[in-house]
């Protein structure tokens, strides 16, 4: 069965682009438009990877990562941070347990390679 990836992105157009790229490459996807939706999704569905933005409304991505890694039922889920922030801005966030960080914009090939690496390490 194809791996399911949760896309956490408050920019709906970007979420649709990510969804299309991932689905065209054999992944199943689910989209959450903010951190609160993401937390709900991981508790209700089998998620194999979370791809999250950092700067979002309601619950920001760093809080999502801390909650996921701090909760026994979800701490095993790998997380890839996908952000437009500069390295200096990224450094202000607590991102313990995050498997990878990629900066927007990223070529689809690079994103897909990073996801493949994460799944290989997790298996």
Image: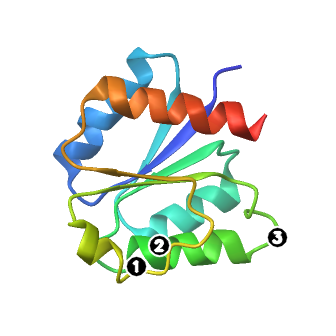
| Residue name at image x 58 percent, y 57 percent | 41
In terms of depth relative to the viewer, which is nearer, 105 or 8? 105
Q: Is residue 83 above or below residue 55?
A: above
| Residue name at image x 36 percent, y 77 percent | 91
Q: Which mark is residue 59?
A: 1
Q: CA distance from mark 3 to mark 1?
A: 20 Å
Q: Nearer the viewer, mark 3 or mark 2?
A: 3
The residue under label 3 is: 72
Q: Which mark is residue 36?
A: 2
> Which of marks 1 and 3 precedes in the sequence?
1
Q: Is residue 84 left or right of residue 42?
A: left
Q: Is residue 106 above or below residue 81?
A: above
Q: Which mark is residue 16?
A: none
Quadrant location, the C terminus? top right
Q: Nearer the viewer, mark 2 or mark 1?
A: 1
Instruction: Give coordinates of residue 112: x percent, y percent.
Output: 43, 27
Instruction: Give coordinates of residue 18: x percent, y percent.
Output: 32, 36
- Disc 1 secondary structure class: loop
Quadrant location, the N terminus? top right
| Residue name at image x 51 percent, y 16 percent | 26
In terms of depth relative to the viewer, which is nearer, 32 or 91? 91
The quadrant where residue 71 appears: bottom right
Q: Is residue 75 left or right of residue 20?
A: right
Q: Is residue 61 left or right of residue 78?
A: left
> Which of marks 2 and 3 precedes in the sequence?
2
Which colour scheme appears in the figure? Answer: rainbow
Q: Is residue 25 above or below residue 114?
A: above
Q: CA distance from mark 3 to mark 2?
A: 18 Å
- Packing grade of label 3 (10 A; few <14, some 14-19, many >=20) is few
> Which of marks 1 and 2 precedes in the sequence?
2
Pointer 2 with pointer 1, Cβ within 8 A? yes
Pointer 3 with pointer 1, Cβ within 8 A? no
């Amino acid at each position: 069965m194809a791996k399911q990836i949760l896309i956490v992105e408050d920019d709906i157009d970007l979420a649709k682009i990510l969804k299309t790229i991932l689905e065209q490459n054999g992944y199943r996807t689910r989209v959450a438009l903010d951190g609160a939706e993401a937390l709900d999704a991981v508790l209700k569905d089998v998620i194999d990877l979370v791809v999250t933005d950092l700067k979002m409304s309601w619950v920001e991505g760093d809080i999502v990562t801390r909650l996921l890694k701090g909760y026994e039922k979800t701490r095993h889920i790998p997380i890839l941070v996908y952000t437009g922030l500069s390295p200096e801005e990224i450094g202000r966030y607590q991102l313990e347990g995050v498997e990878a960080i990629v900066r927007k914009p990223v070529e689809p090939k690079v994103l897909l390679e990073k996801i493949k690496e994460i799944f290989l390490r997790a298996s």
